[in-house]
Image: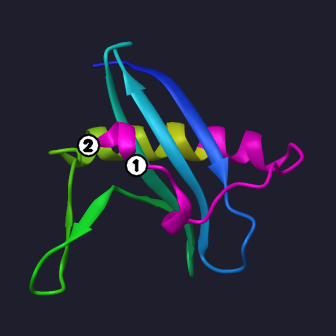
Amino acid sequence: MEITDIRIRQVTADGKLKAYVTVTFDDCFVVHNVKVIEGKNGAFIAMPSRKTKTGEYKDVAHPINSTFRGLLQERILQEYQKAAQSPVQPQPRGDDIDTEDQE
C-alpha cells in the first residue's frame, strides 16, 4: 500500500492539536481527520476516532502493525514540518470541520 497524497490543515488555536491530516492510499482510499498532536516528547499522530456510549474513544481506522504505523507517522510528520514552515492558512477547529463527505 502506497501513500499517494497527504494534505495538512494547520490549526491556529492554542493547544496541543496542531493539524488535521487527510491521507490518500493508492489514489483510491482516503482517511480524514488524522491529527498531529504536540506531546511532551514531540509531535505524534492520532488516528480518527469516535466516542462510544461509555465515553471511550475508539479508532475508526488505524494501522494494524507497528511498522506501517511508524511509516505513516514519519511521512505525515515530514509533510507537517513542511507545512509548518509555510504561512499558516486559518483552518476550522475540529468541531467546525464539515464531515458530510465522510459518512
Above or below: residue 1 compared with residue 63? above
Q: What amino acid type is highlighted by mark number 1?
A: Thr
Above or below: residue 7 compared with residue 36? above
Dot 1: within a 10 Å radius of its alpha carbon, few (fewer than 14), some, or many (20 or more) residues? few
Does 98 appear in magenta?
yes
Residue for point 31% across, 15% down: 28
Give the image location of residue 55, x and y in percent: 18, 86
Residue for point 40% across, 43% down: 32
Q: Element under label 2?
A: loop
Above or below: residue 6 compared with residue 25? below
Give the image location of residue 20, x and y in percent: 54, 53
> Residue 52 occupies which quadrant of the picture?
bottom left
Q: Hey, which residue is sitting farthest front in the picture? A: 100
Region rendered in magenta = 78-103
Q: Hey, which residue is sitting farthest top in the picture? A: 27
Dot 2: within a 10 Å radius of its alpha carbon, few (fewer than 14), some, or many (20 or more) residues? few
